[in-house]
Amino acid sequence: MDDEIKEFEACNLDVVSINDSLQVTVADDPNPSNYYSRVQNIEEGKLFIAWPTQRGIRLAARVEEKLNFTFLRDGIPFMFSGIVYEKDGGSLPQITIIPVAPVVRTQRRQNFRMKCLMPVEITWTEYSSGTDKGREKIQKITTSTYDLSAGGVGIRNSKSIPEGTLGEIRLNLPDGNPVIRIPCRIAYTEKLPENPSMSHTGIQFLAISEREKARVVRYLYHLQIQSLKL
């Protein structure tokens, strides 16, 4: 493990910062769930992170298990991998991670966007400050899309979500297939000039699979064909 620490220190550990929000998945899981955490400390090539959770349920992490991490820097998603070094299940549970691969920037693409309405659910984790610093609270919005592309959705809702927030979106495409679960980030949130009590929020998909993207593209093509018939 010492060699792995030195290898990562020689790469770009300085890209990761204390208090960065993290999305966490198990590297070898063919259908990984998204868990959420935050960097508590960085010391001697190790990351100390809050125990990753999903809807209040802890990740069943094992020592030496490899995990994948996604975080944002200036609105741009980055990824790296690490292994579980130690676990601490105390009053503020945390996991010690040894990164084993350099941080890499993920690709961003422009996508065709169309207006459409379909059910979506967005969940994310908020961390408290002050005397309850580090405590987490699961937040959820159930609403409808305003527009859709292969790279994200827009929603309009009375509850605004802070820009840069990492979460998960459940997209219910009307194609007879299961709900799509995609890790996401809040790209922007702005009040509607015509109705300041409502916000328009742009949500970017992160790590969407090619199969899921193909489903979205097929549905957008269907919408486009339907609009040409009107």
Image: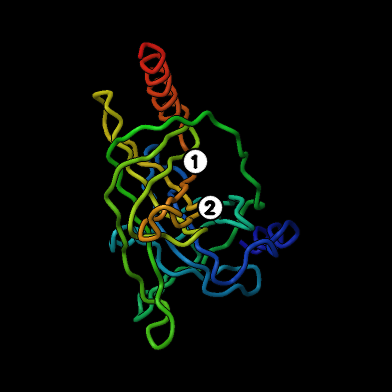
Residue 164: x %, y % from top left: 52, 58
Report which quarter residue 114 is drawn in.
Answer: top left
Marks 2 & 1, CB-CB < 8 Å contact:
yes
User: In the picture provided, is 101 more to the left or to the right than 184?
Assistant: right
Q: Is residue 64 above or below residue 20?
A: above
Label 1 sits on residue: 207
Report which quarter residue 227 is drawn in.
Answer: top left
The residue positioned 62% from the left and 75% from the top of the image is: 43
Mark identifier at residue 183:
none
The residue positioned 48% from the left and 53% from the top of the image is: 186
Label 2 sits on residue: 70
Residue 193: x %, y % from top left: 45, 54
Q: Quadrant of the C terminus?
A: top left
Q: Amino acid at mark 2?
A: Thr
* Distance in Å between CA atoms under marks 2 and 1: 9 Å
Residue 173: x %, y % from top left: 30, 30
Q: Looking at the image, which residue sits at the far right?
A: 10
Report which quarter residue 211 is drawn in.
Answer: top left
Of residues 202 and 93, the one drawn nearer to the viewer in this rendering: 202
- Lower sequence index among marks 2 and 1: 2
Looking at the rendered structure, the secondary structure element under dot 1 is loop
User: In the picture provided, is 10 more to the left or to the right than 131?
Assistant: right
Q: How is the image coloured?
A: rainbow
Q: Looking at the image, which residue sits at the far front?
A: 194
Q: Amino acid at mark 1?
A: Ala
Residue 226: x %, y % from top left: 36, 16
